Every structure is written in structure tokens, then in C-alpha cells.
Amino acid sequence: MAEWWSLSSLACRPPDAARTVAWQSDAQHLSHADLLVRTGCWQRALAQQPQSHCALYLNDPFEFAAALLAAWHAGKTVVIPGDDRPDTVHALRTAGHLLVGDLPAALQACPDDAGATAWNRQALNPSAARMRLYTSGSQGQPEAIDKRLDQLVSELDALEEAFGKVLAGPAAENAQPIVWTTVSHQHIYGLLFLVLWPLAAGRPFGLRRLLYPQDLAACLGACASVLVSTPAHLRRLSNPPDWTQARQQLRGVFSSGGPLPFEVSRFASTVLGQTPIEVFGSSETGGIAWRQCTSAQDPWQLFSDVQWRLDGACLAVRSPRLPDAQWWTTSDRAEPAGPHGFRLLGRADRIVKIEEKRVSLSTIEQQLLKTPWVQEAKALVVDTPVGARVGVVAVLTPAGREQQASRSRRVWLDLLRHALAHSVQAVALPKRWRFVDALPVNAQGKSPESLLRALFTAQTADRTRAPERPEMPAVHWLQRSATESLATLDIHSGLTVFDGHFEVVPILPGVAQLDWALTLGRECFAIPPRFVRLEALKFFRPVQPGTVLYLALQFRPHLADAALCSLGFRLYSHDATTQSEREHASGRSIWSHAPGAVHA
């Protein structure tokens, strides 16, 4: 095992070229000595800026780690935005924060040259070095959470105490495992598990997020490894890749960010050879407890430095991760289980008022999951012509899809409402429904209310009801930023675009592929209003029902004309037999702000 290094003094230590920090392949890795060089470059740039708060957004976790240490040593409060969307960037600018990294017009590191300043750094004061993070927005709007370094360090200590020996592997294996992740380090879970904990423990982290099952299987099987993931990503593991090597090399799988259904845990255990370790906590409380389920009723085990009690029906905790020594009452209902553990019973803060009646959104979700037709459900309040009412986004089971296909829409929805009628009062019965192949998720693998709400506002012209059969497939975002996005589209025979195209061998029309690329591009990016032309439009091979289609989007200034912008798109799928990509379509659309821009 590598020596444990304190984060407060990590950038003050002599450069260690033998301690690997980041790993790309056997031939490409970066050391602690490399990290100190980049930290110096970032610190030199930051020290010249007057702002006390700097908003740090970098896609590369190694550069992120270097800039984070540099900002702390430059005396800055670090702000970690969860995304780089235009509204987020505008809010950061309005607050007077210095933008750093991969944000528009942001500060970049000074050149990495021989004349770099030799910094005589002092160890950080753990109670003075500060960070501001944001909640995921799962229950509404993201909220700012301030953290001190000592709070973060306490969580790293708890994680190492609980799992360090497991991740170290057999004594005969001297190599440290590579930490790979499916989530972004711009959120507390990814920040801790991908960047801060590996830095302190001397475990290298992978330089890229693993978004595809094929990439997961290849990277996890290359050498000793650890996977940091979420329920949404573990649910998407597929059997076509050969997981044999991954099962041999994996030392641990972590899941956080939301409840992990037991059937998903069992499936992941079968595919990966490791039962996921679920970590329960929040941005506000930090890590509270963990479990590794052998049954759906297994209780949560507290980290050794956490105390708990019930405050009414809700879980209350006290730990070094909190701002002070006071008890913090969460919005999670709980009950005792065993001498030291507890079971969670759902959220208590999802109580809303409909027609002055108190309605539990959690109860609606739980009752739907008890039916044989619903696999996942999210309830929220949506606007209707008669006022606020409950809407539901649901993923159906195979039995549910059969029921939906065999009945009229009215009879099908009445069946679902009847299943709720015994536990949900009439005013709370859902009035709006969206049935999707997968819940929309963000880079943290969560389904924030903003993405769910978009399903109710971006449908057909008749927004008072969902279509019997959708024209567009469910969109599952794997990555979203101000310049690049990646999504999967589940292409199924129920899409109306297949009508008449063709009866014997259905083929997805090219015009539908182009329309989806442009529609989703306008949803992701700040695209100018005037369409100018299409360039390099190509269709390589047909798309048939049953295909999981990947849509990669890029938004860039046009290379030849500064007044124009380019939206590039590529549609492809994965061949399970050859483990290769299959190109289906690609092209560019050109857009302009200029009033006189004319379509060519």
C-alpha cells in the first residue's frame, strides 16, 4: 500500500516521480512530480487575480486536481459548479467569481516553462481552506453548500478506514488499483471518490469518464481497478462485452447518488463479479453509512465517526462532516435495524400541496413500483390548465409495456390510477404521464427535476396529453456541456416515424435522424436563431428497431467565418460481435446571429 498523504501538505512535499497520480495506459501516466508542476502553473496564474472566489470547471481530473490545490494555496475559496451551461456561467459571473478552466473566457494556467516559480508553500490550514459545491437539484433547484477542508478530510479518513484494506487487494499484489468513474468530479461524490481520496491514498485515477459498457469492460480488465458509479449507470451494464477480465481485476464497485434497487445490485454483481458497495449521504451531510447487500432488507451500517438518532420519523446525524457539532435532521425517514444500523423508508420532504391537500410524491412512486407494470417512477408537480397537478415519468416493465400496447390510453391510465386509489386521495392521482425507456439523467447519474419537467414541456403541440405513440425516442444524456454532449436514443418499433418506412423491413428515415440531431442540439447549446445551411451530410448504414443509437453533438465557432457557428453531429451504434462502432450518419448545420443570413 502507498503511504497516506494529507491533502493539506500534498503540494508541499518534495516531488515524487514514483507516486502515480493519473493513469491513461501502461505507457501513459502522470506522477506527483507532474502534479506539482501543473499546480505551480495554475498557482502562478491565480495569484495574479484579485477575486477571492474562483469557479473551477475542468473536464480533465488531473488538471482539476492541480488547479484545486493551486487555488487553495493561492488563498482562494473554490467554487465547483455542477455544469458549464450558459445560465450557470452567467450566475457565476454575476456573483463576481473568477472563471477558471474550461468555462467561456476563463483563466488558463500559465505556460509550463523552465522559468516556473519555485513555490515555497506552507501546509494548508484545514479549517481555513474552503470550497462551495452545489446539490444535484434532484429535489428542485441546486443549492450552494459550503465545505471546509477539514470536513472533506474527515470523509476521506472514514472511507479509507472502511474500505482501504479491501481496495488494497491481496498482500501478494503490490500494485495500486486504478480508480475509474462513470460520474463527474464536479459534484461531491465524484470529487471525493475520483480525485481527493485517490490523491491521499496514492491510488491513480483514470483520466476519462467511462460512458460505454465496452470502455468499462476494457479499462476495468486491463489491471487492478475500482469502479465508482451510480444506480443509473449500473443499470445500463450490458452483457455483450466480455466481462471476464474485469471480474478478475475489479477490487471494488461503489454506488451512490440515489437508492440502488436490489435487482440492479444483484445484476451488477453477476456482470462484474463484485457486489456494489452503496454509500449513503448527501452534499450537506457527507457520507453517513454504507451497505453491501445480500438481500433487499439489509440495513445501513454507520461510518465509525457518525452518530444517529430519530428526530420524529426522520434520520438525524452528527459527524465531523457537518459545519458544527449540532445534530442535523435529514429529510429521510428511517427506522432502527439491528444494534447499530437503520433502514431507510423514503423521503419526507416530498410533501406538496394540491388543492390545499397534502400529497406525498414518494407514496405515489412507491405504490406504482408495487404494481407489476412499473420498473421506475418519478412524481413531480406540473402545471395544467386547471392548476398544479401531479405528473409521473415512468419506465415500464415488459408486463407494463404489454398492458400499454393492448389497451386504449384511457383504459391503461385508469388501470394505473386504480392501483393508486387505495393509498392516494383523488386530488393527488396523476393527471400527466410520460412513459420513457429510461429516466433522463445528468453527469452524476441523477434525475434532477429540471430534466423530468422538460419531458412535460417539450412534447407535441397538444401538451394537455402525451401521444399514444411517440415520434421521438427516449433521450438518455451521458454527457452535457456548453460545447459537447452525448446521448443514447433507444430506437424501438413503436415510434411513429417508422410508419410507412417500411412495413417488411422498418428503417429509420434519414430526415428523422437529422431532425432529432438539430432538435437536441438546440436543447443543449446556445445556438443562434438563423439556420444557414447543412454541410457534409452523410448516411452510412440504415438504423432498424432495437438499436441503441448514440448521438454525439459538438458546438463550435465556424472555422472559415467568425460570424457563424457550427453544430456537428454523429449517430453511431456499437457492434456487440466485433466490439466496434458502426457509423450511421453525420453532418454539420451552420447557424448565424446576423439578420441578413440567408439559407443557402
Image: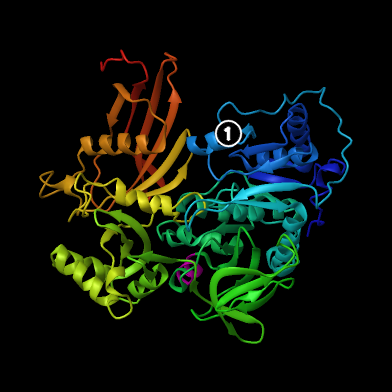
Q: Position of residue 542 (x, y in %)?
A: 24, 41
Residue 322 in view in this figure: yes
Pointer 1 residue? 94
Q: Nearer the viewer, residue 391 or 27?
A: 391
User: Where residue 254 sits: x, y (%)?
Assistant: 58, 63
Does the rendering let one see residue 26? no
Residue at the image position 58 percent from the left and 63 percent from the top: 253
Q: Is residue 208 left or right of residue 366?
A: right
Q: What residue lies at 47% left-to-right and 73% top-to-bottom?
A: 262
Neighbour class for label 1 at 10 Å: few (<14), some, many (≥20)? Answer: few
Q: Amino acid at mark 1?
A: Thr
Q: Which scheme is used to colour this image of the protein? A: rainbow
Task: Determine the secondary structure under disc 1.
Answer: helix
Instruction: Please tell me which residue is depicted at 70% across the width and 64% down the height of the picture.
Output: 159
Pick whichever, 384 or 131, lies toward us.
384
Side of 155 relative to 546 (left or right): right
Report the number of discs.
Answer: 1
Does the magenta portion include 137? no
Give 127 or 291, whichever is nearer the viewer: 127
The x and y percentages for residue 581 are: 39, 42
Query: Would you say residue 267 sits in the magenta stretch?
Result: yes
> Splitting the image into 4 quarters, where does residue 2 fall?
bottom right
**Secondary structure predominantly adopted by residues drawn in magenta:** helix
Q: Is residue 547 left or right of residue 366?
A: left
Span colored in magenta: 265-271
Q: Give x and y (percent) for residue 543.
A: 25, 44
Which residue lies at the image location 55% right of the left edge and 59% below the top edge?
Answer: 246
Q: On the rendered image, what quadrant is the N terminus found in?
A: bottom right
Quadrant of the image containing the C terminus: top left
From the viewer's perspective, is residue 381 above or below residue 574?
A: below
